[in-house]
Every structure is written in C-alpha cells, then in structure tokens.
Image (tube, rainbow, N blue to C red):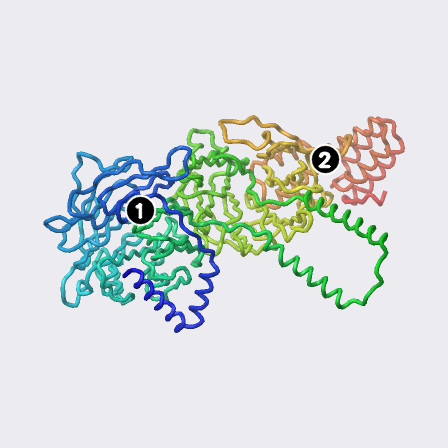
Amino acid sequence: MEQESEKDEARGEAEGQAQAQGPARAEAAEAAEAAEAEQAVLQPAPHKGTCDALYFSADRSRLLTAGADGRLACLETREKETSMSRSWAQKITHSLRVTAAAVSSDARMLAVAEETASGFQAWVHLLDAKGRIVQGQKPRIAGRFTLDIRHLSWHPSLPYLCIATDDGKVDIWHESKGRKQLFKGGGGGGPGAAGGVRCACLDDKAEKIAAAFASGDLAVVDVETSKEQFRSKLWPKSVSGSERLSMAWAPNGSYLALPGEQSVRLMPRDFSKEMVQLEGGHRFSTTIASWSPSGHVLVSASAEAVAVWAHQRLHRIIRFAVEPSSIAWGGCDFVAVGTQAGHFALLQVLVEAPADKDRTAAPVDSQDARDSQVSQETLPSAPSPSTEDTEQAEAQQGQQGVQKATEAKEAPKQQRFQPGATLKGRRRFLAWNGCGSLKLMLPASRLGTRPQGAQVEVDYHSWRDPTSVRSFKIEENVELGAIGPNLFALGSNACGNSTIAVHVASPWQQASFRCTLALDERAEALAISSSFVAIVVSPQRYLRIFTPSFVPIGVLSLAGDIVSMVAHGDLLLVVFQPKPKREPNLRFMLLNVDRKERMEAGQLPLSERSTLKWIGFSAEAQALSLDSKGVLRMLCLHGAGENFGGGWIPVAGLQKLWPVQAEEGALSCVEAEPKPGPSYRFQKVPFKLPCDGPAETFLRQSLLAAHRAQATACGLLPSKDSKAMAKQKKRCAGASPNSASALNLLRIFLESKEEELAMDVVAEFLSRESSKASELEEAKAAASAAKLENLAAQLAKLAQLASGQPALKARKL
C-alpha cells in the first residue's frame, strides 16, 4: 500500500510538472504515447528477492545473476530451446548479507560486498571458464568500511573496481596496483560532507571518476591527481537508504548518462555545454542508465519501464510488471534485465518496425476516392451508358487490371549489394575480387539471434607466402566489406550507426584505423583502394571519401539511393538509383579520386526486366557491369573517338556464373554463388562482341587497345601495363595496335576476294590511324598480290594523299 501511494504521489507530481512546464512536457507526453509500448516477458525467478544481472555473454548463451539469497546463479540456453533455465547456483558468502556484487567484463573476477559482524568488506573472487568461483583460491580483500557498501562497478575493459559506500567514500581497486581512495568521508566542507555515495563509475580511459551523493551532488574527480573538476547539485536529497541509482559514462567518454529524473540527462565530458535531455520514455523517475558496448545505444530503466534510445531519440518502450533492478549487455543487440522480484527478462534492443501495408496503402486509396468524388461533383452529368457498353468497359478494365498486376508482379526490384559479397550461410564472402577475399565466419547462434564473436579471414592474392592469409576477431556484427591490394575495410551498423575500420597489411606505425560516423548516418556502401576509402551514408545520400587513415578528401551528394560501389587504383565507380518506375532506373559515375574529377557519368544500361548483379574493374582499369540476364558490359572512356566514349558495350554473356576478376580480355568466374572453401577452379569467359565473322576480333582488339591507350594517357594503368604497351608498339614497328589489327582484318578480306569490305577497312580505320603511308603501301602490295587491281589503284592514291594528310577521312576517297 505504501508503494502504491508513493507511486500515486509521484504520478501526481509528474503530471503537475508537465502542466507547469507547458508545451515541452506536452510534446514529450505525446512522444511517449506515440511510441508503441510493449510488455516484457519475464523468465522464472532464479533467486529469492532481488535478481541482479551481472554478466551476459556476447553470444547470449550464458547469464550470471546474483540475488538477495547470497547465491551466484548461472542460466544457460540448452539445445533446441529458446528460453534460459538455471544450470547451477553457488553460495558466494556465509556472512550476514550481500549488499552489492559485480562481474568484470571478461567474466574473470567477481566482486562481492558483504556485511559481517566486524563491519563491511569488499572481496574479489576469481571465476573459472564456467563462471564458478575457483575453489581453493583465496579471495582478495578490496576494502573494509564502517557503513554499507552501496555500489560496485567494474571498468568496461580495464581491471578497475569502483567501490561506493554510505560513509561518503569512493575507492578504486586495481588487480595489480591495489586500492586508492579518492573521496574521504567525514564532516567539514570536503566531499564527505555530502553524505553517502549512491554510485560511482570510471570513464573510458580511467582518467575521471563520477560520484553521485545522497545530498544530490554530482562530483567528478581526476583519478591521477585526486582533484575535483566538477560539482553541482543535480538531484533532490536521498532519504531512503534503499534507493538505487546507476549512472554510466559513454564508451568513448563523450557523455555521462545521469538517471534520477523522469528524463535521462546526458552531460558532456567538458561540463561547459548544456546537458541533453532525453524525454518521453518514462512515467516515473529513472534509476538506471546503461550504454551499449559501442556507445550507440542507451538503455534506461524506471519503476515501470525500460526505454531504448538510439540517435538520442526514443526508439522503444518496454513495460515491466515489477521494477527493474539491473541491466547487463549481451553484445550490442540484447540486454538482460534483473528485477526486484527475482525474475529476469531478455530484450532485443533495436527492432525494426514491420511495414504496415494497409497503413501505407490507405492514403492512396482515400486520395483516389476523394479525387473520384471531386470529379463526379464537378464534371457535368453524362447520359448513362447502355448495358453492352458497360460490359465492354468492365471487360477492358478487367484486362487492363490483370495486365498491370502481371507487370507489377514481374517487374524486377533492384537491391543494394556489395561487389563480390555472398548472402547465404554463416560462412560467406564479404568481398572477393582480383585483390583478394574477405571471408566472414560466424559461430552458431543461440536464442534465434544474430551471433557475436565473429572472425574475418583475409587472403591477399598478390602475396604468395603463409602470411597472406590472416584471421581477425571482430567485436561487432559486420555487414559491409571491401578489399584492396594491400588493405581491407569492414563496416558495421549493428548498434544504431556505423563504424568503419581499415586494416593495413604492411603497416608503417599503425596497423588499423577506425572511423565512427555521426549518430544520424548509416553506412550503406563501402569501397577501398590503395589510396582511399569511400563510404555512402544514408539518409543523407552522401558519398564521403577519405584516405585509408580517415583524413577527409571530399564529399558528394548522390541524386538517388546507392546501389553499389567499387574502387580500383584512383578510380571509383558509383551506381545509384533515382526513384524507380516499373523497372530499375540506374545511373553511374566514374570518378578519378586522385585528380578529383568526374570522368564519365550517365545511364547504366540493363537488359529488359533485369537488375544489376555485379560491378568491378579489370586489371587494365576497365569498368565492367553484369546484369541478372547474364550480359557483361564494358565502359568506354572518352578520348578514343571511334569507341563511343562514355558508352557501355556488351562484351560477354554469362549464365549462372559468379564473376571474380577480369584480365587480358577475359572474365574469371566460379559456378553459382560460392561458399568459402579452400580453393576454387576458375572458368575463364573471353570477351566477345555481339558480331559475327572476322570483324568481331578486329573490333574487340581495337576496343581493348583504344582503352589501354586512353587509360595510359590518363595515368590509370600501373607501370607494368605501360611497359607491356611499349613492347607491343615496338613489335608492331611503329604501327599502333589498332592499325596492326586492321591490317590483319584487311588480309582476311583480301584472301577471300572481298574487295568492298577490304576498302571499307582501309577507309574507316587505316586512313585514320596512319601517321605515314607505310601501312597503306603494305595494303597496296597485298591487294596487288590478290590481283585486285581496282583496290590497289585506290590504295596507291590514298597512300599518296596520306603522306601529306595523315588524318585523311574516308569521305575524301
């Protein structure tokens, strides 16, 4: 009854404050009503009295709890089950009572505060791999005090233990350094005059410690010098000794989350800026604030609910029938919540709201109905149609409706993808191209959730030693991957916003670099080369380009949603999609990042009723695209006039093949969608233009030669390709690759007595390519040998003109 009356009073106070503060509180109340509140599902109670969730494993298969019964319990998920049940329980003290307990982040140490006949002590026990206290190992004393130990908390990554007591003391205990006292109890004007300490916590670097006092003061002290940096009265005075409070520093130390009011306050690290108020999640005063391991999500608890905040906005509200007492994180996506009644609940933090089809369709239908009603009211009345006309109109409408439904059903939908990434299985490719491969290996999942503790295996194809294959442990779920010649990048959106990490194969001083995007940005596409990393973020549709160490190079705004992106050398190919109609409407940009210029842009062609399946570059810097109908296309660069610069030319046809790399006019593929394995046998598909006869070979060779020449002129090809180009020119004795190919085609037509075709080759290609008349003289000799006197005479005249006009056009013949 007393608790109910206290809650009624608190509710009355909250309503009074809302009325007094006016529109701000009204908006917060509307936000709270708008958020869809859910009811927490409580698991069976493992303890009598309060249940404190101390440690939740990253794979969510094991939960350690402590209770007022003085026992440490382990709850596990058994095979073919989705709920947790108690596996074992162990008595952790034989004293009068346990006042607080905490488990280190690595589950290696258990801190217990207990009351004995001689006073209050804090002990540290070692835990084995199963979470049990190691038998035969004496616990270490962390401190003795004269009053209750109110709060114990471990640093998120370092072996530091914070001890807060009712006699106004705050101590820090380190596994190897021992104990250090930062706040001393007692009278006078010092910190101890503020009364007991409700809770204390260390920041990410163990440089600052924040303590909340029963008087309502918040104090922040420098750990090294023990000097006070900040003090302010932020709460009303705490009278009851059982009132809980648990504040927390963000993992990057930028904010200190402060419960204690109906809203959650975020105090900046430098204390000079105004605090951020998170409102609308609770009806009663909050007692707990806890950050996810990445710092992207904040969870707060009050007497009746747990609220989830992402991007500093309310994301979810989960109602509780009993008051939550503790929160433990299982990775970045789940929390375990202990309650005052001994029960616990497992909550998935970020849940995407399902699309409400009826709700999205309703406005359209209602608008159509309104338009129809308006048209009937405004248009003049017409004579009623006959029965036959009505039946014909209905039949036509029915046929049109079926046709539209069939078209809508068959219309393909373009999905966003990473080049070389597969989608199926716990072992899959994040990226696979000519530079190497990234293989993601996930452990078996529990509770039907996404597993944690994944590994990424990188294999650089350019290295042929045992160190070319390396394995990296990743802390969060990875969604994006890209690999270059000697580095790779991983992107994660698991906890609300994006973190991009770049790992270098041959580091200079630092082996990896990390970039956390803004709270309102989400990584949608990732590409990397030896000199830059590119990221597309939503919902802004920004293309951000950095150096591999994340020094900003540039930012562009895309005119649509990103579809895919790939990098090679200094080139970056970006494919995006404005609002589609019936079929995908794809646009592309080819950027030269080094020169900061856009080389090509336009419409990306696709086969009818198909979608884009893959994009990439060949070793010769040729941009390639593959659609779902199996058509491979190559982008022609501007500068080679006869090859239609800026256009896409079909160069191959693939069916049920997975492209990996392209080189020397051929595409290396494997069958279907590959699964990570030890080795693969590649199937080479040579480029072939959709032409028949000898002209196809000539056109293809001319196309590739023109691309090499233009890419070399733009500085896109590495030095080895430039040397190969020089050797080829030397072999041709001064003739360009195109003229050499044209002479071969000319000989074929001369041997088959095709005089008109031979003349077309000379007029269209040789006269344009020749800087001297040597090729034409050779063609004249071949025509004379073939006894084609008319052609030989024309070639002699053309050679005479070409000696004075090297770039003679065909129309002058």
> Identity of the amino acid at label 2?
Leu
Judging depth in this view, the residue of 378 and 424 nearest the camera is 378
- Mark pair 1, 2: CA separation: 66 Å
The residue under label 2 is 689
Provide the secondary structure element on which disc 1 rests: strand
Is residue 434 shown above or below 199? above
Q: Residue reaching furthest front? A: 1
Query: Which residue does the image show at 44% across and 32% down from the upper left?
Result: 469
Res 407 seen here: yes
**Residue 130 drawn at (x, y percent):** 29, 35
133 displayed left or right of 274: left
Q: How crowded is mark 2: few (under 14 residues within 10 Å), some or many (20 or more)?
A: some
Judging depth in this view, the residue of 461 and 187 nearest the camera is 187
Q: Residue reaching furthest left? A: 118
**Residue 551 drawn at (x, y percent):** 46, 52
Q: Residue reaching furthest right? A: 790
The residue under label 1 is 53
